[in-house]
Amino acid sequence: MSIIFYAAIYFICWWVSLLAVLPIGVRTHADAGTVLEGSAESAPVKPHWRNKLIACTLIALLLTLGIRYMVESPDFSIQPLLRAIVPTDIRSQ
């Protein structure tokens, strides 16, 4: 596969992992009891952006490498799984 394919996979994995990591450890102003007038109660006190961006970058890298292994490895095949799921009469058509 091309480098563009894996760049697209990495991009998708990065965004999905970012959306998964964002709510972890969030403490809102309402939780802290420091709601300022004119601000939302649900706004995070300290979002810890640097840690979350590093975490989602590493997660996306591991996911992309795993997908690369599944796509390019001769040891990994989806055919046995398909044989178990898809009935024989459908495969013969």
Image (cartoon, rainbow, N blue to C red):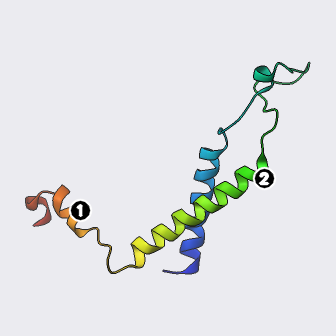
Classify 27 as above or below 30: below
40 relative position to 88: left or right: right
Residue drawn 87% across and 24% down? 39
Number of labels in the image equals 2
Which residue in the structure is indicated by mark 1? 81
- Under circle 2, the secondary element is helix
Give the number of the mark in front: 2 or 1. Answer: 2
58 relative position to 47: left or right: left
Residue drawn 17% across and 59% down? 84
Query: In the current view of this chain or complex, which residue is farthest to the right?
Result: 37
Classify 25 as above or below 71: above
The answer to which of 14 and 88 lies nearer the viewer is 14
Residue 8 placement (x, y as % from top left): 58, 67
Which residue in the structure is indicated by mark 2? 50
Residue drawn 77% across and 48% down? 49
74 relative position to 26: left or right: left
Classify 73 as above or below 92: below
Residue 91 placement (x, y as % from top left): 14, 64
Which label's residue is closer to the chain start, 2 or 1?
2
Q: In whole angstroms, how far apart are the C-alphas of marks 2 and 1? A: 40 Å
Residue 41 placement (x, y as % from top left): 79, 22
Is there a contact, CB below 8 Å, between mark 2 and mark 1?
Answer: no
Q: Quadrant of the C terminus?
A: bottom left
Q: Residues within 10 Å of mark 1 (few under 14, many from 20)?
A: few
Which residue type carries mark 1?
Leu
Which residue type carries mark 2?
Arg
25 relative position to 5: left or right: right
Residue 61 placement (x, y as % from top left): 59, 66
The answer to which of 82 and 58 lies nearer the viewer is 58
* Occupied quadrant, residue 54: bottom right
